[in-house]
Image (cartoon, rainbow, N blue to C red):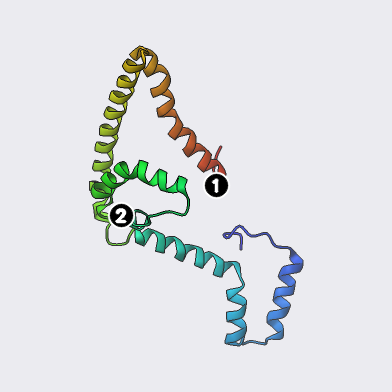
Amino acid sequence: LDALELSYSEEELTHAQDELKECGTRIPFKAFTDWYESSVFWEKKNKDAEQMAESAEGIWGDLYDFPKDTALANFMYIVTAPITFTLALTVGIRDVRIPGNEGWCYWVFVMSIIWIGVYAYLLVDWIQTIGVTVGIPSVVMGLTILAAGTSVPDLLSSVVVAKDGKGD
């Protein structure tokens, strides 16, 4: 129970032990299944199974899900489609979370590094073009826009980790 991070009192443990004693040395299968399906063990197994089903779909499951429920979701899908599809066609060829595809992790890692370089190059080029168009010096653009743009992902990942309760 400690491994599942459950809190329990001595009274609850004593009650559970008394119920087991009432059943004798054998517990009927129906009683066990009723108990198991209402327990935290069942909930954990279901949660693990759902996560495995999601990872088995891989990145392609989300790509085929269009149109979305709201106009904003449709807009975001269209805006992010170029980056999502290019990543899916190179990095998402084999989802390494699926058992049997672990050997593809090296390909995925190398392609991820390459895409980071390509996107960083494009980002700097586009920001520089915007700065020249608007009349803002490249140094100012680099110190403000690019600095903020590279810090936001760190901020978002820190928020996600903190929400999971694993932050410092």
Pick whichever, 138 or 104, lies toward us.
138
Q: Tell me whether the residue at label 2 lies in contact with that at label 1, contact meaning CB atoms closer than 8 angstroms.
A: no
Pick whichever, 112 or 140, lies toward us.
140
Pick whichever, 91 or 106, lies toward us.
91
Q: Which mark is residue 164?
A: 1
Q: Residue at x 35, y 60 (%)?
A: 57
Task: State whether residue 54 is above or below residue 109.
Answer: below
Mark 2 crowdedness (10 Å alpha carbons): few <14, some 14-19, many ≥20: many
Mark 1 crowdedness (10 Å alpha carbons): few <14, some 14-19, many ≥20: few
Q: Residue at x 46, y 45 (%)?
A: 72
Task: State whether residue 85 is above or below residue 114.
Answer: below
Q: What is the CA distance from the residue labelled 2 to the residue labelled 1?
A: 23 Å
Task: State whether residue 148 is above or below residue 99.
Answer: above
Query: What amino acid type should be assigned to the residue bearing mark 2?
Result: Val
Question: Horizontally, is 136 left or right of 125 in the view?
Answer: right
Q: Quadrant of the N terminus?
A: bottom right
Residue at disc 1, secondary structure: loop
Q: Quadrant of the C terminus?
A: top right
**Of callouts 2 and 1, which one flags the residue occurring earlier in the amino acid sequence?**
2
**Toward which corner of the image does residue 21 lie, by quadrant?**
bottom right
Q: Which mark is residue 124?
A: none
- Where residue 154 appears, x then y in whole percent? 45, 33
- Where residue 62 appears, x then y in whole percent? 37, 55
Query: What amino acid type should be assigned to the residue bearing mark 1?
Result: Asp
Q: Which mark is residue 96?
A: 2
Residue at disc 2, secondary structure: loop
Question: Horizontally, is 67 left or right of 37 in the view?
Answer: left
- Where residue 17 appears, x then y in whole percent? 70, 76
